[in-house]
Amino acid sequence: MGGVTVRVLSYNVRSMRDDRAALGRVIRACEPDVVCIQEAPRFLRWRSLAAQLARTSRLLVVTGAATSDSRLLVADLRVRVLYTEDVRLRKLPRLHQRGLAMAVLEVQAARFGIASMHLSLNEAEREYQVPEVLAHLRRLSATEVVLAGDVNEQPHGLRWQGLVGELTDAHLAAPWGGELTFPAKEPTRRIDGIFVSSGIEVVRCGVPTEMPELARASDHLPVLAEL
């Protein structure tokens, strides 16, 4: 990113069904430039709820929510938005629709693509979602890319390994803070992650476990990376 440091936060917010004030405080305390949200509200009043989340986080909506089936990107004012796209992934019958909220962003002349994802709970569906997600990332008009979200699988899983076949697991590159992300109250698994292309240096990445309101804000813990 040309010597520029960007803070990226990935966060499954469970449709804002928990303590919304705590959620806003957690996001603000992380001081992110960009937040990749999963399970953003996507039904009744989804636009106003997405705006509320951005406002309480002191950020602005970039793209997503219902148009990407609950993926959302929000960003700080210093982030310049060059391009946005919301896409839906292929799905199996009777399973929940999944999608991507994607953008090309610029921070102090450093340009990068970014996407928020939430893969299926169904292993067969995840199998073809991973190459589809990677193909969409390659379409972005940016040399370097960041992918963040809820994989619904742990790092030893085949689909997680499919992601790191092309991208770098940011936590392994520079661990910082906690590792486990779910469930928030007593985490036992790492199913949320941030992945970067080869030209992005990971300064540090992990779960900011020192924040006291994490268990009130969502059922997932956030992942924060300095890139």
Image (cartoon, grey):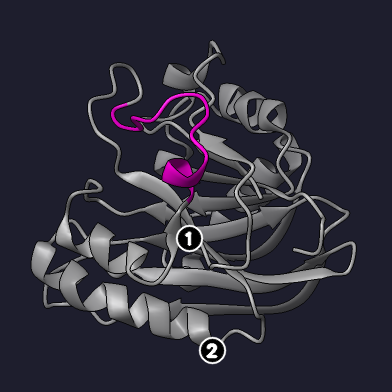
Magenta residues (range): 170-183
Q: Is residue 66 left or right of residue 199?
A: left
What residue is shown at x 66% (from left), y 50% (from top)? 227
What residue is shown at x 82% (from left), y 56% (from top)? 3
Question: What residue sits right under mark 1 in the picture?
Answer: 71
Q: Earlier in the sequence, mark 1 or mark 2?
A: 1
User: CB of mark 1 within 8 Å of CB of mark 2?
Assistant: no
What residue is shown at x 86% (from left), y 53% (from top)? 77
**Is 180 contained in the magenta span?**
yes
Which quadrant of the view contains residue 132?
A: bottom left
Q: Is residue 157 above or below residue 134?
A: above
Question: What residue sits right under mark 2 in the picture?
Answer: 139
Type of the residue with mark 1: Arg
**Is 189 contained in the magenta span?**
no
Image spot of residue 5 (x, y percent): 77, 49
Q: Is residue 2 left or right of residue 165?
A: right
Type of the residue with mark 2: Arg
